[in-house]
Image: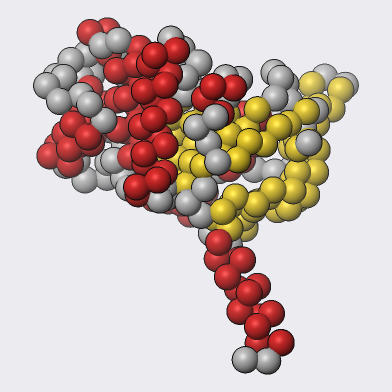
Amino acid sequence: MNNSESKITNNSQSISDNVLEFKEVWKIYQMGDEKINALAGVNLSIKKGSFTSIMGPSGSGKSTLLHVAGILDMPTKGTFLMNGKNTSLLSGKEQARLRRNEIGFVFQRFNLFPQLSALENVLLPMIEPDPEKAKGYLNKIGLRGKHAKLPSQLSGGEQQRVSIARALVNNPSIILADEPTGELDSKNAEIIMGILQELNNKEGVTIIIVTHNPLAAEFTDKIIEMRDGNIL
């Protein structure tokens, strides 16, 4: 193989390795007469199968970065690519399809429907409800025998496990978790981070978490720090 062929091969490999790419991404909010740069020209690549934590003080842009990564928000300027696709060029339906097929979300406050059981909460995002598959995920993360429990009948750690099962039920390639241990004590936080680490190690799920907790960040392979909309 000559040098030019080698360069082409290496370039194609590096492109395929990057599941998420931020290229000079800005997110600007207008607050009265003031413009807030939530993201200020972010350049970042997330490799397939990686486990990344994003840290920084409140207002540093962490959650905004996660919202862009989850196609919940579009950049004001710059380009965000998911699996090589420029998300800003996709229709609303295409964006929704990409979110549904590729991304699982885990939130700090669990976002469970209080009137629904653990199983029913996990079934919600499924296009074609499959109770056996949903039960399998609940069992996998340690909730065997608690399928019929309402969120109010579960501990905080158990509720977060339900939200993880819900995030996994459509077999996403990416999990985005916004402060997944923020509402938990240290013991349950460690359990939840261990579950996420196992998903990353054994199933190759690409995981990004936003966290203030340095102990949670220790479970990840890479720590990114943000300040004032920039990556340090």
For image coordinates 18% across by 15% down, the residue present is: 149
Q: Is residue 148 left or right of residue 222?
A: left
Out of 133 and 213, give the one closest to the viewer: 213
Q: Is residue 194 above or below residue 41?
A: above
Q: Is residue 174 left or right of residue 199?
A: right
Residue 132 visible in the current orientation: yes
Out of 111 and 163, give the one closest to the viewer: 163
Badge count: 0
Q: Quadrant of the N terminus?
A: bottom right
For image coordinates 27% across by 45% down, the residue present is: 127
Q: Is residue 115 above or below residue 6?
A: above
Looking at the rendering, which quadrant does residue 201 occupy? top left
For image coordinates 58% across by 34% down, the residue present is: 53
Q: Position of residue 51 (x, y in %)?
A: 51, 42
Q: Is residue 15 left or right of residue 26?
A: left
Judged from this view, the residue extending furthest toward the right is 33
Q: Position of residue 188 (x, y in %)?
A: 38, 16
Looking at the rendering, which quadrant does residue 15 occupy? bottom right
Q: Is residue 95 left or right of residue 11?
A: left
Residue 184 visible in the current orientation: no
Q: How is the image coloured?
A: secondary structure
Q: Quadrant of the C terminus?
A: top right
For image coordinates 69% across by 48% down, the residue present is: 44
Q: Position of residue 128 (x, y in %)?
A: 21, 45
Looking at the rendering, which quadrant does residue 138 occupy? top left
Q: Position of residue 86 (x, y in %)?
A: 62, 58
